[in-house]
Image (tube, rainbow, N blue to C red):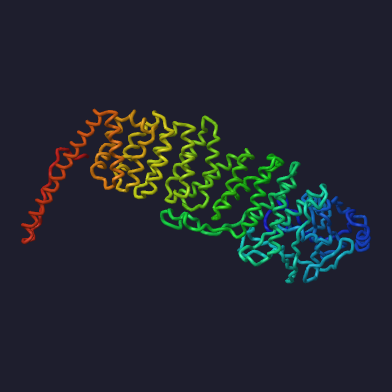
Amino acid sequence: MDGFLGLGGGTMKESAYFLIAFLNFENPVRSSGLNGHDQACFDRETGNSSSPSFPSFSLPPAALIVIVKTVRRGEECSLVFLDRAQILTLLDFAEKVGNLYEIGTKGNLEGKLAENRDGESYAFSSNASTTSRSHPATGSRSGNSNAAVIPGLNPNSGPHYGNNLHDPLKTKVNGGVGTVPYEALPSFRDVPNSEKQNLFIRKLSLCCVVFDFTDPTKHLKEKDIKRQTLVEVVDYVTSATGKFNEAIMQEMVKMVSINLFRSLCGQSRENKVVEGFDLEEEEPLMDPAWTHLQIVYEFLLRFVASPETDAKLAKRYIDHSFVLKLLDLFDSEDPRERDYLKTVLHRIYGKFMVHRPFIRKSINNIFYRFIFETEKHNGIAELLEILGSIINGFALPLKEEHKLFLVRALIPLHKPKCIPMYHQQLSYCITQFVEKDCKLADTVIRGLLKYWPITNSSKEGMFLGELEEVLEATQAPEFQRCMVPLFHQIGRCLSSSHFQVAERALFLWNNDHIENLIKQNRKVILPIVFPALEKNARNHWNQAVRSLTLNVRKIFSDVHPELFEECLLKFQEDEAREEETKMKREAAWKHLEQIATMKAASNEAVLVPHRTSTNKPSG
């Protein structure tokens, strides 16, 4: 065998259901796979019947015909319709006799290319400008063959919608164009049970043609045929009563991959506006091919969830590469697609235990790139929703790997400015960790304080809501570890001129569990927040904030009146000290202004005497 010509990606072992073989019989070959008429022609042309026999294949009716004609060197290129095992046999035979010198494999062809409803098969003949059809029993025209352009195949890229997509219904040979019919296959109820599996494979092959949906007027009949065929294969998978074998799984995953795995177009939502708060008002970008994509997703979901799918066999095809390509699709702008992906990935995580660490690691990597590099991704909310269910199922005690995930991925997800798009799901994941292991509360609260917003009031309100959920699951020992920095931040929120921030901070006292934690540690907390409470009660512009502040002051005064009076006295002393400092500062400025006025006419500089300090300079 002189060489191997790969068409459209993938190796022979990975795909290879259809085969284009350029046959070169240098030596006479006898084939037990030919019928009597063709064998006689073969013997007459070669003049010898003593060479190794061409392998005989037992083809099922669905595979139908292997076209093997009487050929001489360079005379004919035949389209051979083989399954994987038969291809391997043919290659082994070719290596022995040295008569097969070029092979191209491609899984993205539909079954009608190999046969039509009359049982005829297509052969790419020698000097013809279009494809010539030949019946297996009658031979075909011969001549010098050139490689054909496979219908719908771009050798340099995978399938995608609307971008340089070849017409899936045309094939070019030597500059000519021939139309390959795309016709519906028989219904499952019209064939005996023994033929249903083979018909299923043929229907999967028919669904491997990807249509261009950017032009709604193009291929309407063929698109409807494919949609109906997809519905039929979904029903077949749903009602299956026997385990899917390896060959079936391979074809199913191939069809799904060809239809789903494509390049995504469009800009990520998160960076379309500065703060990300008006994104929900924008119309999402809907994929025009959704009428087909939805059924393919439903097919994949039914296949993964089916009790007839053996995970040990299926993991060979739903492998790491397949999972990574699914994760790439989470960046789709179409919310319908992301919703299906969320369900499918969750089912894969549940069924394929061997893939669980890899799935978690891959999601981590998406988060890292989003947080520290791009801040652009459409599917963070859906990925977090999946993780919420995964975290809920973590066994106790938590593994160190899971704690690192919390610290390195989940907590830093509070950093991007587009957090409103996924905050609800993120907050649920964070709370799940604290409920699983209350000792993580200190880590989580300090993480929130690290990323606490300074100028974004809406984001600050979300942080306060999440903080309340975390505190509700926090026990006293962990609360005491972080209460000082925590209530310094809460005090700043109480003093906020944005009434919603101040109001949300005051609502913390409406939670019984949090109020009890505060009461138990009032000697530390009240001195920290008292100045903010007192200033709010006197000066805040919003009536609701003033009213809530008075309620909180009353709680403290009722629980520990002596401590409250001490704090009030200290506040008044600090206030008097501040007023004295303020008056001195104003007096100093007034004095400087007077001196400057007196010496302005003489243009004499005003010198301020240096105040000597009692502290010796360091160093």
| Residue in front for this viewpoint, 489 or 550 | 550
Q: Could you say where residue 130 lies in the image, as x and y percent from the top left? A: 78, 70
Which residue corresponds to the image point at 36% horizontal and 50% vertical from the top-left? 456
Whether residue 87 is visible to the viewer of this picture, yes or no, is no
User: Of 382 and 544, which appears nearest the observer?
Assistant: 544
Image coords of residue 325 (percent x, y) = 60, 50
Of 398 and 194, nearer the camera is 194
Q: Is residue 260 left or right of residue 536?
A: right
Q: Quadrant of the N terminus?
A: bottom right
In the image, residue 230 sits, relative to residue 469, either above or below, namely below
From where the camera sits, is residue 430 visible? yes
The image quadrant where one finds the C terminus is top left
The vertical placement of 372 against 557, above or below, is below
Residue 72 rendering spot, x and y as whole percentages:
86, 64
Q: Quadrant of residue 153?
A: bottom right
Residue 597 at x, y = what percent? 8, 57
Count numbered badges in the picture.
Answer: 0
Q: Is residue 293 left or right of residue 278?
A: right
Within the image, what quadrant is residue 218 found in?
Answer: bottom right
The answer to whether 205 appears left or right of 433 in the picture is: right
> Image point 28% across, 45% down: which residue?
543
Q: Residue at point 52% right, 30% down?
A: 397
